Image (tube, rainbow, N blue to C red):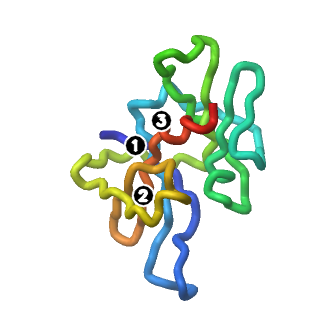
């Protein structure tokens, strides 16, 4: 399956200069309608305005820099009003990447709280790609 990959910041490590690379976010391309430019900085995770719901991924991941110049417009879900849009605010989309489903590993149950909006992770070299589950993200937001 194809994913849009966004670099979200350095991986947390116990020692500065650790061998871990960057933490990245994978957004499923099949659930994406289009990508748009936005000039919105929002501190709240979720805000609604003019039939559009904005979900800030930097705010969700508690990042200090909340700049998110890209909006990923999600495809309409069953039962959703046709004029209502859901837009994920995200930092730069670095690349499109094909990730085989069998290579995505589930997250340990101990991570359910902080990482409940993700369905798994993919490791590539020293980088970790957290795979977003938009349906989980939207459960408590709308």
Nearer-N-terminus badge (3/2): 2
Nearer-N-terminus badge (1/3): 1
Few, some or many residues within 10 Å of mark 2 (<14, 14–19, 20+): many
Figure check: 92 above or below 55: below
Residue named by callout 1: 3
Figure check: 137 above or below 110: above
Work out which residue is located at the far top of the displayed protein and give it.
82
| Residues at circles 3 and 2 in contact by the CB criterion of under 8 Å | no
Helix, strand or loop at label 3? It is helix
Q: Residue 4 at x, y = what percent?
A: 45, 43
Q: Quadrant of residue 83?
A: top right
Q: Residue 23 at x, y = what percent?
A: 50, 63
| Residues at circles 1 and 2 in contact by the CB criterion of under 8 Å | yes
Q: Say which quadrant the N terminus sits in.
A: top left
Helix, strand or loop at label 2? It is strand
Q: Residue 61 at x, y = what percent?
A: 61, 57
Alpha-carbon span between mark 3 and mark 2: 18 Å
Figure check: 89 above or below 131: above
Disc number placed over residue 135 in the picture, else none: 3
Q: Which of marks 1 and 3 is in front?
A: 3
Helix, strand or loop at label 1? It is strand
Q: Which residue is drawn at 38% across and 57% down?
A: 121
Residue 122 left/right relative to 118: left
Q: Nearer the viewer, mark 3 or mark 2?
A: 3
Alpha-carbon span between mark 1 and mark 3: 15 Å
Figure check: 72 above or below 25: above
Residue 23 left/right relative to 89: left
């Amino acid at each position: 399956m194809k994913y849009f990959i966004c670099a979200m910041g350095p991986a947390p490590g116990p020692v500065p200069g650790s061998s871990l690379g960057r933490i990245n976010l994978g957004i499923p391309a099949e659930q994406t309608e289009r990508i748009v430019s936005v000039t919105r900085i929002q501190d709240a995770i979720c805000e609604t305005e003019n039939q559009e719901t904005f979900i800030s991924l930097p705010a969700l991941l508690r990042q200090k820099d909340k700049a998110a110049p890209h909006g990923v417009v999600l495809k309409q879900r069953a039962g959703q009003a046709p004029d209502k849009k859901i837009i994920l605010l995200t930092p730069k989309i670095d690349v499109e990447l094909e990730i085989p489903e069998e290579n995505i590993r589930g997250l340990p149950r101990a991570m359910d709280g902080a990482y409940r909006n993700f369905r798994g992770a993919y490791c590539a070299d020293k980088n970790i790609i957290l795979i977003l589950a938009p349906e989980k993200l939207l459960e408590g937001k709308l």
